[in-house]
Image (tube, rainbow, N blue to C red):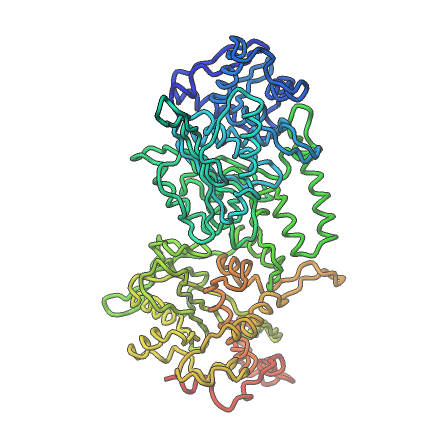
Amino acid sequence: MISNTEIYQEIPTWDNGVWTTTTFDSREDFTAFVRDLFKEPGQYKFDKTSLEFNKEAIKFKNTGVYCISAFKSKDFIKYWDGEKAKCRKGVIYKSKKGSWYIARDYYMWLNFLPIFNKEIQQFGFADIRDAQYHMALYEMLAELNYKHVAILKKRQIASSYYHMAKLINQQWFESGVTLKVGASLKDYINEKGSWKFLDEYAAFLNEYTAWYRPMNPNKIMMWQQKIEVRKGNRKTEKGLKGTIQGMSFEKDPTNGVGGPVKYFFHEEAGIAPKMDKTYEYMRPAMRSGLTTTGLFIAAGSVGDLSQCNPLKDMIQNPSSKDIYAVETDLIDDKGTTGMSGLFIPEQWSMPPHIDKYGNSNVKEAVKALEKQFEDWKKELAPEDYQLRISQHPRNIKEAFDHRSVSVFPTHLLAAQQQRIDDKIYGYEFIDLYEDEKGVLQAKKSNKQPIKDFPIKKKTENKEGVLVVWERPIDDPGFGAYYASIDPVSEGKTTTSESLCSIYVMKNSVEVTKVTGIEAETYIEPSKIVATWCGRFDDINKTHQRLEHIIEWYNAWTVIENNISLFINYMIHRKKQKYLVPKNQIMFLKDLGANKNVFQEYGWKNTGTLFKAHLLSYTIEYTKEEIDVETKEDGTIVRKTYGIERIPDPMLIKEMREYADGVNVDRLVSFAALVAFMRIQESNRGYRKRTIMDDTAKKLQKSENLYKLKSSPFKHIGNKYNKFKSNSFKRSPFKNIK
């Protein structure tokens, strides 16, 4: 990507007021030098030396010219050759207090490429800002390490201006270079977007510098640096012949990505739902064998959450995407440290918390933001508040947090996610198999569950693993566990995001605890005990896994019958007893739904049925108040909500990100299960269990028990049971063979 002789030899160096040059022995030595300088805004400690960074721009601003020497004079040529060297190699600045490296593109931008300054509302040159300096160093390190660039940024950091300067630098001084700029929408990069910055830069350079560069063609979205000249009677072309091409991906994410590329800049990368495809198609054009020869730059703020997943993936999983990764403690609001692409938060270079040398006062900025966020929370509706935060994020989590008004209680979901993260729910990964006698056995597995949502269509291994929070009790009676399945129709697929999902829940139990002659009755609430989400290349293996799970728990199972393959599989295996008949699914009766479905088992999923009915059961399940802890004076210490019965982080994630059009396999199966269980409990009552201590057991056997004025067991399953056992004339499981 970078010529050895070009980048690290004879780098212009300002050493305490004296100009000299610095040469490094190797590319690796130079890389180490830049890496040692790379810190964070607020830590660079610019001093008065920073006034030298943009000295040429200040001179032009004051005098209207860069060089007063006569055109093409010795001094004129010396000046412009010297500035060209700085624009091509960058500049090292040294003072008694520190050293800094101004990357080549940053130097050229600061001094020779004016922008519209929003702070002063007029055209001028960019001020020194440590956040922009930081961004330039990051991109230089990515290039030196043969990696690509992903930048998640706050707004108003002049990213578009800077990256157009990066392209201009190459176009103006490199021979035969191919440069491209793209975006999901044409208006982001045409004369309404960033291309106008190229026009402004070119016009300024051609008018005020010695670096005149004509373009032919010279049209929006296509430049080539050349001019047609005559030599005798012949026409020929003269110039560096480098090109800058613009392209949009509105219709095709692979539009114009062919051919070798030096730099590709993806504008508005946070509003680019198909950028991952563009990136994968572009990468071969930036490689020669195993060597990276070009640089892919994705930079943007987060737009609509449905459009930012590619950038999110690059930022959060940089190594897997060949993105240059940096360590940061801005993963979330807890100071969690991890590796990511470059994140530029609101508190970096935030006016007015910037000193005269361009250093960020990060602590002051954070305090100011805390106050601002408190005011916004009072003033704005929840959806608007979340959107506002995402555009001014203090950490990566805030940038990507769900910001639409959720049908689920977001505060409860967030709290539950934290409990899961704190590992208060014990779990194990289990493989189920049949031994040589055909008996079902369980063993711990080294496989991992699917943690991507939504899963990528092209993900090869979608098998997942059975996650178990509680193994089945010994000899579970029929009705101790219920299950629900959202099936799939295909085997291997790289064209679908759909997964097979099953949840197993332990039913609520009315527990009577007898201590001596005292009895206490309470409800042990239902809870998720196991889940699997995935699919096999062989559909029969998918069916076998489902069969093993429901057989292990002896679980009565509701299933969507839109896809009948698993139902037919269980009938063929003579195990249809595990499937809930359609006439036993009470929520269908309540709605009068599925009347025209002739399938004997399961329920037919319609969008209306799920969204208008089943979902409401799930929402209520999460919000249900299941326990209240109080002090002696009645003051409430803590409330426990139903959400705490959901230990599955992926189900929580689907709830948080649920919206129309989002594929939520886990949520569909869980919603059907909750609705089924709720109606079963309402119509048939709770299962019962009695726990007695030794004294109670002795009393039960003792003749003295009958001498008591009233039996301590008289009320069990009667007074404290809302639903008496004789309320049904027949067993709910009568039809099950």
User: Does residue 34 show up?
Assistant: yes
The x, y position of residue 113, in whole percent, is 57, 28
Residue at the right extreme?
633
Q: In the figure, 405 relative to 318: above or below?
A: below
**In the picture, which quadrant includes the N terminus?**
top left
Q: Quadrant of residue 372?
A: top right
Residue displayed at 62% across by 60% down: 405
Viewer-nearest residue: 396 or 415 = 396
**In the picture, which quadrant includes the C terminus?**
bottom left
The x, y position of residue 137, in whole percent, is 51, 28
Residue displayed at 58% across by 83% down: 723
Q: In the figure, 127 relative to 711: above or below?
A: above
Residue displayed at 44% across by 82% down: 582
Viewer-nearest residue: 151 or 533 = 151
Viewer-nearest residue: 424 or 705 = 424
Q: Quadrant of residue 562?
A: bottom left
Q: Is residue 283 left or right of residue 609?
A: left
Q: Quadrant of residue 56?
A: top right
Residue at the left extreme?
436
Residue displayed at 64% across by 67% down: 625
The x, y position of residue 150, in whole percent, is 48, 39
Marker count (numbered): 0
Q: In the figure, 324 relative to 465: above or below?
A: above
Residue at the bottom extreme?
729
The x, y position of residue 285, in whole percent, is 35, 39
Q: Is residue 593 left or right of residue 127?
A: left
Viewer-nearest residue: 637 or 110 = 110
User: Does residue 696 show up?
Assistant: no
